[in-house]
Amino acid sequence: MYLETERMVLREFTMDDFVDFHEIFSDSEVMKYTEPPYDMEKSRAFLREFCIEQDPKGGFAAVLKETGKVIGYILFCSVDDPEIYEIGWIFNKNYWRKGYAYEICSHLIKYGFEELELHKICAEAIDTDKSVSLMKKLGMQLEGTQKKHTKNNEGLWQDLHWYAILGEDYFLVK
């Protein structure tokens, strides 16, 4: 996988990305709505096993063209059916609210429907501020909320919001 946008490149990870990867996954604020921050060993194992060795790949590097720095992790892989993909994102907090996640995810959705001919792209989140607002901006619709379905990093039960966009809807508004 290799995609380019105006400011970014989406590509496969390498172990050379470890420092930038760990900077993202070890940050408690970044990981607040996912799981506890990773220590170096867990970052290294996840990067190697899920992003590099797994075939097909599950996670991809969102890289700033200008500097070559990995500023985000993008999940893009099939779930349940080869024509249904899940998309997800985790970005270095120093790059939040600058349009990078929207830029790369909107391009990836376009690629998914126009090149891979996917039926559906979905995403889930417990964060109703940043994540859900991005899902809506990407054209996704709420498909359901699972009440108190998962725990946050403080051990409190949270609602899990499931959003998706169908290929037929993508092409209607394109």
Image (cartoon, grey):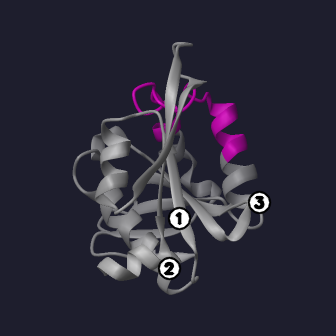
Left or right position of 173 against 70 = left
Residue 4 x %, y %: 39, 77
The magenta stretch is 23-46
Tag 2 residue: 113
Left or right position of 131 against 125 = left
Tag 3 residue: 54
Tag 1 residue: 121
In which quadrant of the rendered view does residue 93 lie?
Answer: top left
Residue 1 x %, y %: 58, 75
The alpha-carbon separation of the residues under discs 2 and 3 comes to 23 Å
Residue 30 in the magenta stretch? The answer is: yes
Q: Residue at x 50, y 23 (%)?
A: 158
Q: What amino acid is found at the position of numbered circle 2 in the picture?
A: Phe
Marks 2,1: beta carbons within 8 A? yes
Residue 39 in the magenta stretch? The answer is: yes
Q: Residue at x 40, y 34 (%)?
A: 127
